[in-house]
Amino acid sequence: MARAVNSNARILLLDEPLAAMNAHEAALIIDLVLRLKEKGGLLIIVTMHKYAQTLDIADRIMLMQRGRVTYEQRSANTSVAELMDIVRREYRAMRATTAQ
């Protein structure tokens, strides 16, 4: 991440950047991402499973299932509860189709 921040990268892809981080370290990463976002000129794509933190960072939320976008919304227009409900429904639907 440090290399990308100090280069002229135009896209930053972060795969679970808060995984295995304690609360203090996660806060530092979130702060860095928010500062990069404010600076502009950089597309930041983050994969995360911690929805509350995702909503704090992201402008848009996209959920994917089997390589397909199944949900897309501005982060201001959704909630952790809604995202969890969608994920549960998708999981149950997937289990129902694979059980047959």
Image: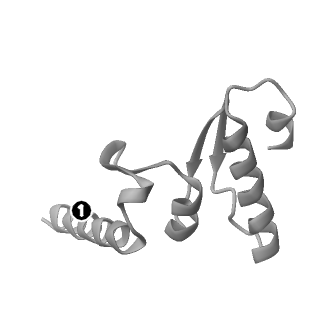
Left or right, 88 with respect to 53, comes to left
Please report the residue visible at 24 percent of the width from the left and 62 percent of the height from the top.
94
Q: Nearer the viewer, residue 36 or 3?
A: 36
Instruction: Name the colour scheme.
Output: one colour
Element on which disc 1 rests: helix
Q: Where residue 57 sits in the image (x, y, percent)?
A: 59, 56
Toward the left, the furthest residue is 100
Q: Residues within 10 Å of mark 1 (few under 14, many from 20)?
A: few
Q: Where residue 24 sits in the image (x, y, percent)?
A: 81, 73
Residue holding disc 1: 94
Quadrant for the N terminus in the image: top right
Left or right, 45 with respect to 73, comes to right
Please report the residue visible at 75 percent of the width from the left and 48 percent of the height from the top.
35
Q: Nearer the viewer, residue 94 or 82?
A: 82
Please report the residue visible at 73 percent of the width from the left and 37 percent of the height from the top.
39
Q: Nearer the viewer, residue 77 or 24?
A: 77
Q: Amino acid at mark 1?
A: Met
Q: Is residue 74 above or below residue 6?
A: below
Left or right, 7 with respect to 44, comes to right
Q: Where residue 10 sits in the image (x, y, percent)?
A: 68, 26
**Image quadrant where residue 75 sits:** bottom left
Question: Number of callouts in the render?
Answer: 1
Q: Is residue 20 above or below residue 6?
A: below
Quadrant for the C terminus in the image: bottom left
Please report the residue visible at 75 percent of the width from the left and 67 percent of the height from the top.
27
Left or right, 42 with respect to 82, comes to right
Q: Is residue 93 above or below residue 63?
A: below
Q: Where residue 13 sits in the image (x, y, percent)?
A: 64, 40
